[in-house]
Image (tube, rainbow, N blue to C red):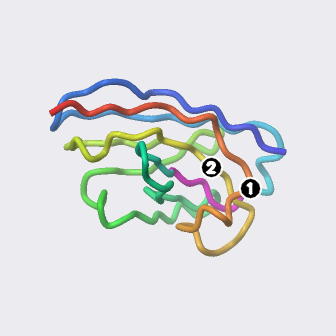
Amino acid sequence: QVQLVESGGGLVQTGGSLRLSCVASGRTSSTYFMGWFRQAPGKEREFVAARSWSWGRTYYADSVKGRFTISGDNAKSTVYLQMDSLKAEDTAVYYCAASRAQNRPGRSSYYDYWGQGTQVTVSS
């Protein structure tokens, strides 16, 4: 089992920045990808970014490329999502997730463990 706890959400104005954190605990040695997903009201959960746990390779949704950066500190079992140039359409609950699968980092169905989510609200 892997437990994930997110933090760092909040209210920010358009163009502002936030940094989300996700601390993993438990059997993290089985984790291959750490990912961030988001879900806005009335919409399906969508992929935001992912990072391979060991190699640090990163993946991004087109909608956030150039604005969001995923990074990690393996010693602290923590993954971060730096969000810059935020837009109103970035408003959503953001979820951290851990996957044991070695492919499809953008597919939510491939993730085994999920955090409780943190709300990000961007006001225009």
From the viewer's side, name the closer residue of 105 and 51: 105
Q: Amino acid at mark 1?
A: Asp
Q: Residue furthest bottom?
A: 103
Location of residue 64 by image quarter: bottom left
Q: Position of residue 124 (x, y in %)?
A: 15, 33
Instruction: Determine the secondary structure under disc 1.
Output: loop
Q: Residue at x 55, y 54 (%)?
A: 35
Q: Is residue 83 above or below residue 43?
A: above
Which labelled disc corresponds to residue 28? Answer: none
Location of residue 41 by image quarter: top left
Q: Residue at x 68, y 39 (%)?
A: 24
From the viewer's side, name the closer residue of 96 and 93: 93
Q: Residue at x 36, y 42 (%)?
A: 82
Q: Position of residue 94 (x, y in %)?
A: 48, 41
Q: Which region of the structure is painted magenta?
A: 31-36
Residue hosting label 2: 97
Q: Main secondary structure of the magenta part?
A: strand
Q: Position of residue 39 (x, y in %)?
A: 46, 47
Q: Residue at x 38, y 34 (%)?
A: 19
Q: Amino acid at mark 2?
A: Ala
69 relative position to 89: left or right: right
Residue hosting label 1: 112
Q: Are marks 2 and 1 in contact (CB under 8 Å)?
A: yes
Instruction: Determine the secondary structure under disc 2.
Output: strand
Circle 1 crowding by C-alpha within 10 Å: few under 14, some 14–19, many from 20: some
- Circle nearer the N terminus (2, 1): 2
Circle 2 crowding by C-alpha within 10 Å: few under 14, some 14–19, many from 20: many
- Does the segment drawn in magenta span residue 63? no
